[in-house]
Structures are given as C-alpha cells and as structure tokens.
Image (tube, rainbow, N blue to C red):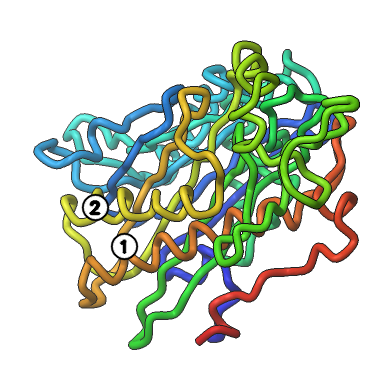
Amino acid sequence: MPLTNAITDVPGIKVGQAQDLEALTGCTVILCEVGAVGGVDQRGGAPGTRETDLLRPMHLVQKAHAVLLAGGSAFGLDAATGVMRYLEERGIGFDAQVARVPIVPAAILFDLGLGSARVRPDAEMGYRACAAATSERPQEGNAGAGTGACVGKILGMGGAVKAGTGTAAVDLGGGCVVGALMAVNALGDVVDPASGRILAGARPATLGPVRLGGPGPFADTLAVMRGFVGKTALRFASHGNTVIGVVATNAALTKDEANKVAQMAQDGVARAVRPAHTLFDGDTLFALSTGDKKVDANIIGAYAAEVVAQAIVRAVQQATAAGGLPAAGDIQPDFGSPQDFRSRS
C-alpha cells in the first residue's frame, strides 16, 4: 500500500485521539497492542512524564503497549489510567502472573494558558482515544495532544501562534518504514529545516513600536533574546511549553538501539524549533520498534530526525486559529505545504 505520510504507515501502529475543542485540550494515544520495544530521550528542562525509566536499558520490561501524549500539564498524566483500563480489558499487558499490566509511558505538554485551565485530559478521555484508534491517517492540527498547543511565546501568550499535532513518514525500501507523530507547543519558533525561514513564531506586534528580527511577519525569537526586551521578557516568559512525540518503525531494534533512535530523533526538534530544549520546554521523544526488518539502527535514527522535523512543520501548517490566537496560515498568505519524502525520494 502507498504511504500516507503518517506514523500509521508503520505496521502495528494505531493512533487514537480525543479532544475538547471548547476547553482546548486533548490527548493522543499511539497503540502497539502486540507490544513494541521502546526507548525514550528527554531533553527539555521542564518535563512531565510517566513510566520513562522502564524504557531505558538494564530494566526488566522490554516492550510498551501504548504511548500517551496529552495536554493538561501534569494533570493530563491521568489519561494514561484510561489507556491502561482499555488495554487490561483486552488482556493486553506485561505478564506479572497475577495480572497483566499494560505498559503505557506518557508525556504531557502545558496547554492550560489557552482555553480552560480547569478542563484537562482524564482517564475517560484516554479511554475514548483508545476506542477511536485506527490505522488510518490521524487528524493533524487542532487535534489530540495538540488541541491547545501554540508556539512563539517569548513575548507572552498574546503574541503566540496556534500550533498542534503533525505526522510524517518515510519508506526506506524493503518494506521498512519510519514514522513520527509530534505535538508542538514550543517556547520558540518553528522554522523550515531547509531554509531557516520562520513558519510560525512570536509576533512582533506585541513589541509596539519596537521591531526586532528580520523581514516577515514574525519577530524571530533568537533576535528578541539578544536584546533588552528579550532578556526582560525571559523573566516572565511562559513556563508552559514542550514538544513531545513518538517515532515508530518496523525495523527490529534492541532496547539500546531504540533509546539511541529516540536520541537521534531529537535532532529533528533542533532542526525545526528555534531555540529547542530550553529550560522552559519539556521536550520528550519516545521510540517504538514493532517489527523485524533488518535495517541498521543508524539509518533508522537518521531518518527519525527527518520525519520528526517534517511532522513539526506539519503541526503548524495544519493548525487553525483558536483561543484568540491566529494560525500561521492566517499570517502568511503564501504558507504552502512542505515537500514530503514521497516527492523527495
């Protein structure tokens, strides 16, 4: 079957999403019900995670059965309880002899500043996301964990731009696929990895008569950070940011290799988000191996970074205005779709 440019192109992967479009929050579940060798890499300075230690080498459990990405800050981790309930009802989990315990690592992003801060993903929403899971291409933009996401917040929420959820995939030949799904809620700007052009970021209108950065509709967070305004703004910048996501492949990976792939995939965040991995971001990436294709882990990791970068770009391109924030397409009339790997191969 032809690729749809989504993480669900990876055999054994399903995606389910649930969201509250009024409260602007939601969650995304990546299901791998037969189990997938997992890894994780956490680089941001403000993470919110669950069950990440067991994904590291030298730990007993070898496979995960789902990964949860959610809004709601630390409250959103509660949605993993619903994912566990869904899997337990179907007899899926680590065999602990007296019970099967579903392994559900999770990461959250802070979306309480948009929509309602009192509505967060909970166990019921996590369960609904699982019930909706399919191998079809998942919705992007204002969906799932990216429902309340935005980027470009150095000048405050008033100057941010709506972002969301994005996905991408590449066929490496021989039936081996690498895919990514990302929820993008960064402090910094999202840029075109090839040209460095800002695609979505802080808006200079919030600076009044002061104009920082180069030509175009965005202030350029790096340029802002160099000046007095930026240094002052950082004292009051939103602490609620994070880029979280999952990379999946049907290549056979050991647990060590899955962790290495997650580490290499973080390069995609650095290519598409500027700046990335700040103390105000909780950037976390999971890696899942569902199959038995014999492909060098270095190749998987290299292309994991590529699809992560593309998924981040798609997350801002597919987003629509919400919560009083414009989307990038509202600001840039020529905001086109990026080339994907089908047209580049």
List x then y, in percent, for residue 99.
26, 32
Q: Are marks 2 and 1 in contact (CB under 8 Å)?
A: yes
Task: Quickly name the residue at label 1.
Answer: 301
Q: Residues within 10 Å of mark 1 (few under 14, many from 20)?
A: many
The correct choice, above or below, for 127 with respect to 121 in the image is below
Q: Name which residue type carries label 2.
A: Lys
Residue at 75% x, 56% y is 318
Disc on res. 166: none
Residue at 64% x, 32% y is 125
Q: Residues within 10 Å of mark 2 (few under 14, many from 20)?
A: many
Measure the alpha-carbon separation of dots 2 and 1.
Answer: 7 Å
Task: Quickly name the residue at label 2.
Answer: 260
Q: How many numbered discs, if any?
A: 2
Q: Nearer the viewer, residue 208 or 80?
A: 208
Residue at 52% x, 30% y is 108
Q: Nearer the viewer, residue 308 or 180?
A: 308
- Compared across the picture, whether 45 is left or right of 320 comes to left
The correct choice, above or below, for 198 with respect to 282 in the image is below
